[in-house]
Image (cartoon, rainbow, N blue to C red):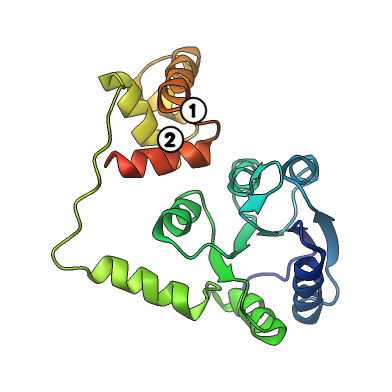
């Protein structure tokens, strides 16, 4: 059984939804210390020291909550991260999972259901809304496998290699090591990738990689 989280960060910009999340967390972990953030920037500032558990929305006023998830996972891999969102499509779901989310909950759950899901994490059960669990099963049971949608690929071979590694969860320094290049060179390649694909974050780059069949 995993230890109970002592510190929990909830990232949500809608007050009513924040109240729902905070009450569910309080019901599940009454002794935990909660902190809240309503923007991506504020959440990133609250990752030091890193919380034991992160509940994060995807659509924030100043960017994607997946950037917060990614930053926490890089800073503290042992931290648990759960996405709480209205997005139930494959792209958001599988991008969140690739970036390290250990749960994906839609905002149509009753507070008691969410509290029970969070408690079940202690026994290793990932918190997943029923619809999300069905979507995941359907995705992996598709016969024949769905071919990835191919989009225009302006990248060089080396840029595609770096993007593929980053989309699999490698950090830029780890990608550099895997490709036997310097971290500076890897950063140069990833900057070129962002510019050519018109993306501004790792989460957007992973989505682009999926569309290109690289992830």
Query: Measured along the vertical axis of the image, is residue 125 above or below residue 139?
Result: below
Marks 1 and 2: CB-CB under 8 Å? yes
As drawn, is 124 to the left or to the right of 81? left
Q: Earlier in the sequence, mark 1 or mark 2?
A: 2
Q: Residue 211 location, x and y as percent?
A: 32, 43
Residue occupying image coordinates x 82% and y 57%: 36
Q: In front here: 97 or 41? A: 41
Please tell me which residue is depicted at 47% across the width and 25% down the height of the picture: 194
Is 169 located above or below residue 54 in the figure? above
| Quarter assignment of residue 24 | bottom right
Question: Relative to 2, is 93 above or below?
Answer: above
Give 30 or 215, whichever is nearer the viewer: 215
Asked whether residue 168 is in view, the answer is: no
Q: Can you identify the residue that label 2 sits on?
A: 166
**Marks 1/2: CA–CA distance:** 7 Å
Mark 2: few, some, or many residues within 10 Å (few <14, many ≥20)? many
The residue lying at 47 percent from left, 14 percent from top is: 188
Seen in the image, is 94 located left or right of residue 44? Answer: left
Q: Mark 1: give few (<14), some (14-19) or many (20+) Cα within 10 Å.
A: many
In the image, is residue 49 above or below residue 9?
A: above
Q: Quadrant of the C terminus?
A: top left
Instruction: Pick the quarter of the image with the N terminus.
Output: bottom right
């Amino acid at each position: 059984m995993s230890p109970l989280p002592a510190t929990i960060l909830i990232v949500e910009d809608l007050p009513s939804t924040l109240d729902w999340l905070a009450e569910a967390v309080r019901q599940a972990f009454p002794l935990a210390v909660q902190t809240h953030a309503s923007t991506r920037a504020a959440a990133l500032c609250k990752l030091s020291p890193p919380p034991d558990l992160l509940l994060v929305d995807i659509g924030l006023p100043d960017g994607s909550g997946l950037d917060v998830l990614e930053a926490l996972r890089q800073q503290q891999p042992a931290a648990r991260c759960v996405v709480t969102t209205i997005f139930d499509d494959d792209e958001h779901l599988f991008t969140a999972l690739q970036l390290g989310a250990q749960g994906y909950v839609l905002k149509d759950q009753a507070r008691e259901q969410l509290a029970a899901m969070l408690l079940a994490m202690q026994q290793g059960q990932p918190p997943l809304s029923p619809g999300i669990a069905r979507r995941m099963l359907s995705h992996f049971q598709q016969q024949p496998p769905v071919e990835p949608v191919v989009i225009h690929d302006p990248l060089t071979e080396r840029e595609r290699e770096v993007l593929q590694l980053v989309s699999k969860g490698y950090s830029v320094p780890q990608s550099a090591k895997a490709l036997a290049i310097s971290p500076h060179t890897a950063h140069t390649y990833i900057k070129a990738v962002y510019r050519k694909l018109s993306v501004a974050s790792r989460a957007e780059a992973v989505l682009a990689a999926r569309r290109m069949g690289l992830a």
